Image: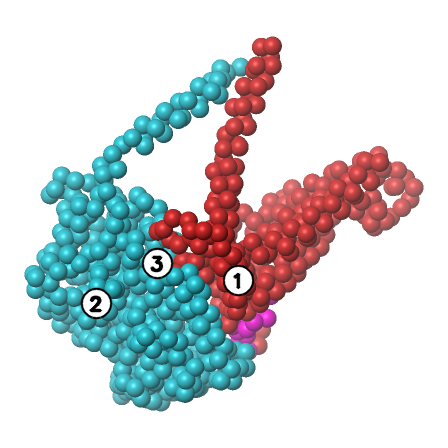
Chain colours: A cyan, B red
Amino acid sequence: MPRIIHPSKAIALACATLFCAACKSPSAGPIRVQYLEIWAPALNEEFKSIARSWARDTHDSVEFIAVTLNDLPKRVAAFVDVPGAANLAVFPAVDAVIHASALADESAIVSTLATSGHTPLPNAEAMNKTQGMWPGVPLYAWSHLFVWRANLLRKKSLSPPTRFEGLLPVARILTDSSNGLYGFGLGTNGDDDEKMFVQSVLWSFGGAVFDSAGKVVLDSPRTRDALKYLVSLYRSGVMPPGIAGWDGASNNRAFIAGTIAGTANSPTILYALRHQDTLAASDVMHAMYPEGPAGRHTFATGFSLVSRRDDPKRDRVRELILFMMRPDNYARLLRAGEGSVNPQYSGYDTLSMWTNPQLRVALESQNFEHHVGWPGPVSAAAAEVFQRHILPDMVARVLNDGFTEDAAVREASRRVQEVVDRNASAQRP
Amino acid sequence: MIVQRRARATWSATSIPAILLFLLTVAVPASVAVLYAFTGKRLGEPVAGFTLTNFSSALREPLFTAALRTSLRFAVVCVVTKLAIGYGLAGILTHAGRSATAALRLLLLPWLIPGSAACLLWVWLLYQPSGVLDHLVRSVLGHPSRDILGSADGAFWSLVAFNVWRETPFWALVFFASRKLVPPQLQEELRLAGTSTWFAERTLVAAYSAPTVLVCSAISFVWTFGEFQSIELITRGGPSNHTQTVASVAMDIGYAAGIDLGTAICMMLLTLPIILPAVLLLFVIAKRRRAALIT
């Protein structure tokens, strides 16, 4: 029979091992970098490469933790709540603002970047700055655009609509349902593209979820106008069947498969096509969001570099951030993204890739982009309203459940108010 | 004395790791979760004082009541269907003889496929307009396309079908094994008395399988009530939140921007008054049935 170690000896050994591990200095060890794995592998690799260069130059060390978009909320929670989970992380800008109390103030780094001639863009400042501090260093953002099959537009001698009123006629001309082609396609099941689209339409029609003071103003005539427009678009027959069950990738798949001629998306489709070679990139056209009665408004998604304010490795992390945001390194990162992400600082729009008209659209779209909760401040409530797809649900209630526009708007407004009240009672920013 | 010491050492060596594992993976996380539910814990800050605010927030959540109804309906429909089909399959396998082994292997396939992969398979099956089922309906049968995942009933029954397809094989296997508990001499006596197979099934086999069926019902009810994966991957709670269950709403709130874990955990705790009595009742009946068999 094998010899069994006495339990008391085993427990003593385990305790000694744990004690030795705990005695290690908290400021020693590699910098753990939690980076976001986006759809551009080259950008992900360049991000790591820049960090490794810093480690080489300073005789330091870095470790990487890859986080996908789906895992991001949980990783954000872990970073904020668990000291040592990571030292540097890529956060959605809105999460950096919401959890600012746990994060280091990066105002000094942003000032340093500004003195080198690269000031944060107005939208970057709106997304990232709160109560006079920068809880994160703006890293990049991606735009939401209209994506069209240029070959189909050319065939029908059409141009992308510049106003929302023009969208339906263009989509109707492009639709050939007998051959399985539809003029426009976007899901109604609350995926990210639909969330951004509905929010942008609401703003473009003069409506909003919050006013500039953060008060709920969703229940308004302008919201009803925006809702009427969306319902008429979805019911017009220009969209393929099954959109009520679509997920976030369905419109991408449908576009690449040739089922839809247009959709609203970030520049991921063009990036994927250029690398997969399934469809000529010249057959894809980016266009800015059309204008509505209240002008052109669209949605911005920004990301920033954050670190914890109580991190014992704070000094080293600061050096790493400064290195990564050095103009030459930042330009490397943007070039690796091939236009799939936008810079957050002035002076980078002269990079050669922005001469490509398809990519230039995304860059110029920043002039019309707003953060979640606009015209109010970024807040936990605003972000939760967006993430829980309350606006798309409002549309779906009319389309799927036979609600009147009035009833749908009132229900959505009640849900938004409940979110605001709950976050207020928990004293979240 | 040496034997006793060795027995104690063996017990410690085998039990302590299991106890530690239980504490680390179940007891400690559950305790922390309950702590979050009853305190004003915010991310990045220490636990605050005792409060019931999270419970009132959970009850005020507009989607909570509907999600609770959906969870209950989903659990009851799935459990009843799985048990009926599983019990029937077990009966067929019992009388299948040698071919039972091969049948069992095929039967277990849905259960062996990783859950997320199985969910994606079903999405491709049901997807419109280019899903497999949609193609069959349109091109082969010549019927118009049906938006299954886009309608409230279609989405709900798709989730039920998925749950039954995936879990029935496991229960069929358990019931198949439970039928071996029937004493062979009793079966032989009934056969010699000239009773039909159906009579033996209704009386003898049902009596001996009852405790197992009841315990399985209880376990299946708990698992199905808390089902999250298939809802998140197949319907994402849609369309229009019609297939949101308590677990999916709690996940939405728990990991939305504010990361309101307290309210999310409270939602799950509020389902205990439904789950616990149901499970206890089934266990009590199972225990009584078993006691009746022994006497």
| Badge 2 element | helix
What whole-number distance in Å separates the C-alpha atoms at marks 3 and 2? 23 Å
Are callouts 1 and 2 both on one chain? no
Q: Are marks 3 and 2 in contact (CB under 8 Å)?
A: no
Residues in magenta? B144-157
Q: Say which mark, if any, is on residue A69.
A: 3
Left or right relative to A202: residue B249:
right
| Residue matched to label 1 | B56
Neighbour tally class for label 3: few under 14, some 14-19, many 20 plus, Cα within 10 Å: few
Q: Is residue B47 visible?
A: yes
Point 86% across, 49% down: residue: B199
Q: Earlier in the sequence, mark 3 or mark 2?
A: 3
Judge depth for marks 3 and 1 and give the one in front.
1
The image quarter containing residue A133 is: bottom left
| Residue matched to label 2 | A125
Amino acid beneath label 1: Ser
